[in-house]
């Protein structure tokens, strides 16, 4: 609907028409009633004009039907907007189960994007057409906000926390990317572009360039370098809990509460390990604050994500690869992970 109106940005994602239709509806309802009021004012001003300036209006004591009418009709209209907006909102914030994940960090004054295959880019984001993409991001310093108008997505980048937006690009092209939260002198320069490519072109782009090491492989490397591997044994016999198959699962905490093992919980457990102790384990883990940066944290999360789901026990193999992988660049022995 909005695409023909130059006031609207292009519609380049699956979410764009949904947002625009709702916005257009709200605008149309507002315009309709504004018009009625304006027309009534003009018509009555002309019709009841009193050239003598001496007539006095008839006393009006109220009208129950009128009052009911102008209460009930707006009630239903606003409830309809509320329900519609709620549906759109849930769609906006709930990513589908299968998404192509890209990590990002905002800092003064640029956006860094990290693809799980290993490529990283600054102020540019390449995504494939027709595939749901989820961008998980945080800030390294102050509040920023990732805004892609053509996709109708925007979310704050908050230090110490992960935010995400998701979208399915529906049109090939290059679109603006903004920081939408004032973050200092060069806030207005914290911009970039999203490049939507045909899936084949995207694959070609992915395989060209890049470090050759996936985020999960880099995460695995960090896992060894930082010594995590010494305690988080895969069979659960170590001083820390096994991380195999834990991503997305529920974990019981020492204080009796349960927590979902998600990006934010993993990050928190690395930086402030004592905060939410897993039941059955002592408070022995040191903080890794200052030892691992945002990109490292994201790589560690990707590594933990890549560990097979709970049903697939392969402790011996994983342990062996852990010992072998440290010096060489060999990512992971034997493809399936
Ligand atoms: Cu970052 Cu404004």
Image (cartoon, rainbow, N blue to C red):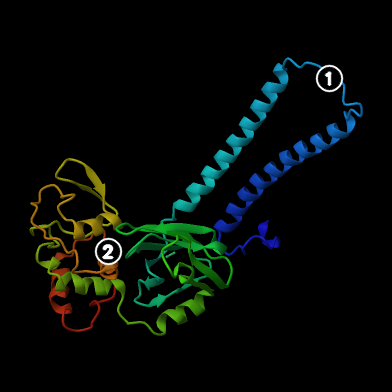
Q: CA distance from mark 1 to mark 2?
A: 77 Å
* Residue 252 higher or lower than 327, as above or below: above
Q: Tell me the number on the disc at residue 301.
A: 2
Left or right placement of residue 332 versus residue 127 in this view = left
State the residue in front, 165 or 140.
Answer: 140
Q: Residues within 10 Å of mark 1 (few under 14, many from 20)?
A: few
Q: Quadrant of residue 61?
A: top right
Q: Quadrant of ligand 1?
A: bottom left
The residue to which callout 1 is attached is 56
State the residue in front, 192 or 329.
Answer: 192
Q: Residues within 10 Å of mark 2 (few under 14, many from 20)?
A: many
Q: Quadrant of the N terminus?
A: bottom right
Task: Tell me what residue is drawn at x 49 percent, y 50 percent.
Answer: 91
Task: Tell me what residue is drawn at x 89 percent, y 27 percent.
Answer: 50
Q: Is residue 310 visible?
A: no
**Residue 200: x percent and y percent?**
50, 78
The mark that comes first in sequence, 1 or 2, is 1
**Residue 251: x percent and y percent?**
21, 49
Q: Quadrant of residue 117?
A: bottom left
Mark 1 or 2: the one toward you: 1
Assign a secondary structure to mark 1: loop
């Amino acid at each position: 609907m909005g695409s023909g109106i130059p006031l609207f940005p292009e519609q380049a994602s699956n979410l764009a028409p949904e947002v625009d239709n709702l916005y257009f509806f709200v605008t149309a309802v507002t315009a309709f009633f504004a018009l009625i009021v304006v027309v009534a004012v003009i018509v009555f001003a002309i019709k009841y004009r009193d050239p003598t300036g001496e007539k006095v209006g008839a006393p009006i004591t109220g009208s129950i039907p009128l009052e009911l009418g102008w209460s009930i009709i707006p009630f239903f209209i606003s409830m309809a907007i509320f329900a519609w907006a709620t549906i759109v909102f849930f769609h906006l914030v709930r990513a589908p189960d299968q998404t192509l994940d890209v990590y990002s960090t905002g800092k003064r004054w640029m956006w860094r994007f990290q693809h799980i295959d290993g490529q990283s880019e600054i102020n540019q984001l390449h995504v494939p057409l027709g595939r749901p993409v989820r961008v998980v991001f945080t800030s390294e310093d102050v509040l920023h906000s990732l805004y892609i108008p053509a996709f109708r997505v925007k979310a704050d980048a908050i230090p110490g926390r992960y935010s995400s937006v998701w979208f399915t690009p529906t049109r090939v092209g290059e679109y603006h990317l903004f920081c939408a939260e004032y973050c200092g002198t060069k806030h207005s320069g914290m911009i970039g572009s999203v490049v939507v490519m045909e899936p084949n072109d995207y694959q070609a782009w992915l395989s060209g360039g890049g470090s050759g090491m996936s985020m999960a492989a880099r995460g695995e490397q960090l896992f060894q370098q930082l010594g995590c591997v010494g305690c988080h044994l895969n069979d659960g016999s170590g001083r820390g809990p096994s991380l195999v198959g834990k991503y997305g699962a529920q974990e019981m905490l020492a204080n009796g509460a349960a927590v979902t093992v998600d990006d934010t919980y993993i990050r928190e457990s690395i930086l402030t390990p004592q905060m939410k102790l897993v039941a059955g384990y002592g408070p022995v883990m040191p903080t890794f604050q200052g030892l691992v940066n945002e990109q490292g944290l994201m790589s560690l999360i990707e590594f933990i994500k890549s560990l097979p789901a709970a049903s697939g026990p392969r402790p011996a193999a994983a342990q062996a690869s852990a010992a072998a992988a440290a010096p060489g660049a060999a990512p992971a022995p034997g493809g399936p992970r």
